[in-house]
Image (cartoon, rainbow, N blue to C red):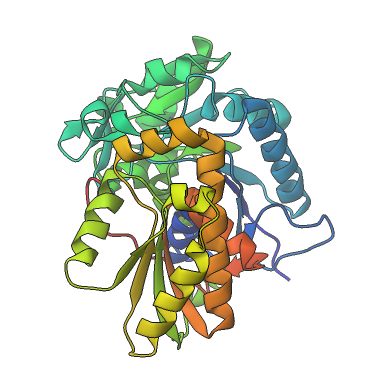
């Protein structure tokens, strides 16, 4: 059995699948777990991604779960660790990126890491510490209207400094452009200045590969899944990837398909609108759920009727930011979210029992709830799952 090399902690389910897919493409046999496995469970993989649900929970809970995941990953033999969060860096001023990064550094007895949520392939770039989504700053991308984690400040140094006890610095693009040695020299400068966390600029995939090389000796790396582009090569150079040529082998999966959407993002709203123009869809309304109406039964029957005609259906709770805020005001943020997640999970479970074998799920919280509701404990990305992301700068 292969001893794991890289241990990853992801703050939501879809982010975990992005990361696992990135590592798999780089030649690492990757297993994603749904939550933290029991301590005695040994996994045969080069990389392990533990998918948690950290983004909007209290910071103390996020820290506790992350440290538990770290303990499990260390027991698996991992030597390097990666804390993955969203490429839009969306959070509150209380957490949870800063508190978790601090706690992981403390546990690893280390004094420095980078923070780089850049994902140029999907339009997320960082320049002089400012996060862009496509051609606009984060605060103009639609994320400023996010119902749970509105992002109104694009300067990640300021954002991160507000939620960490550590001093935050910046590895600017002019250093990135000079290569890995220049980045390592900049890291040494920052450490001498007392900096413990540093935002790293990146405007292209090439920058992420260089950052990956420069950070090969760090015990902890934090960022979006994009930064994982440069990590497998470090293990390849060390001749540690014995099965790299087979890491991406995937079988064809047969069966009917259903799309479930719980995300309230600008991109998902646009995708739902496009789908509804020509394909069958059913909307799950939180207020109807709160009144006890048989929304789940109706959705399942709707899907069954169309699946019988070999039509793929969309079942969605996606709404505009104003609609989401109105529902949250009426029901409360937590109750509104749980109603939708529970409904979509029940729908997915019943459709799985009816023979549906392929689900496309939009929304990190929704995806985690659906997979957990389906009873999945882990996903082997080298053999059992293919992850696709729409190349949309506003996604």
Q: In this view, does 296 lie above or below 94?
A: below
Q: Is residue 157 above or below residue 90?
A: above
Residue 169: where, in percent of width, then height?
A: 42, 17
Q: Which of 241 and 350 is in front in this view?
A: 350
Q: In which quarter of the image is residue 196?
A: top right
Residue 290: where, in percent of width, then height?
A: 53, 48
Q: Which residue lies furthest to the top in this view?
A: 193
Q: Is residue 238 visible?
A: no
Residue drawn at 48 percent across, 62 percent down: 295
Q: Would residue 266 be found to the left or right of residue 169 on screen? A: left
Residue 351: where, in percent of width, then height?
A: 52, 77
Q: Is residue 273 above or below residue 245?
A: above
Q: Would residue 42 be found to the left or right of residue 246 on screen? A: right
The N terminus, quarter of image: bottom right
Q: In which quarter of the image is residue 362?
A: bottom left
Q: Can residue 230 be seen in this view?
A: yes
């Amino acid at each position: 059995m292969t001893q794991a090399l890289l241990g990853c902690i992801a703050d939501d389910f879809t982010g975990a699948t992005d990361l696992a897919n990135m590592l798999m493409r780089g030649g690492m046999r990757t297993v994603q777990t749904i939550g933290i496995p029991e301590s005695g469970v040994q996994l045969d993989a080069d990389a392990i991604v533990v998918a948690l649900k950290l983004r909007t929970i209290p910071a103390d809970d996020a820290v506790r779960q992350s440290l538990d995941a770290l303990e499990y990953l260390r027991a698996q033999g991992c030597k390097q660790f990666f804390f993955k969060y969203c490429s839009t860096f969306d959070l509150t001023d209380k957490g949870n990126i800063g508190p978790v990064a601090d706690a992981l550094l403390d546990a690893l007895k280390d004094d420095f890491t980078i923070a780089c949520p850049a994902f140029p392939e999907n339009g997320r770039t960082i320049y002089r510490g400012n996060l862009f989504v496509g051609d606009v700053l984060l605060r103009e991308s639609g994320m400023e209207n996010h119902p749970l984690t509105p992002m109104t400040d694009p300067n990640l140094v300021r954002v991160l400094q507000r939620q960490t006890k550590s001093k935050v610095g910046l590895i600017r693009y002019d250093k990135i452009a000079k290569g890995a040695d220049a980045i390592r020299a900049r890291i040494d400068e920052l450490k001498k200045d007392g900096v413990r966390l540093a935002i790293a600029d990146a405007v292209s995939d090439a920058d992420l590969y260089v950052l990956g090389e420069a950070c090969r000796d760090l015990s902890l790396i934090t960022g979006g899944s994009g930064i994982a582009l440069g990590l497998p090569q470090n293990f390849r150079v060390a001749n540690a990837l014995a099965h790299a040529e087979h890491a991406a082998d995937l079988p064809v999966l047969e069966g009917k398909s259903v799309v479930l959407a719980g995300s309230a993002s600008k991109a998902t709203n646009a995708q739902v609108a496009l789908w509804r123009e020509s394909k069958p869809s059913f909307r799950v309304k939180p207020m109807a759920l709160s009144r006890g109406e048989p929304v789940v039964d109706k959705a399942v029957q709707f899907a069954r009727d169309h699946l019988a005609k070999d039509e793929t259906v969309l079942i969605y709770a996606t709404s505009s930011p104003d609609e989401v805020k109105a529902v949250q005001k009426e029901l409360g943020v937590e109750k509104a979210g749980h109603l939708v997640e529970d409904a979509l999970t029940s729908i997915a479970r019943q459709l799985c029992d009816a023979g549906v074998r392929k689900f496309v799920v939009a929304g990190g919280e929704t995806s985690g709830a659906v997979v957990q509701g389906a009873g999945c404990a882990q996903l082997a990305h080298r053999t059992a799952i293919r992850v696709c992301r729409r190349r949309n700068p506003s996604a």
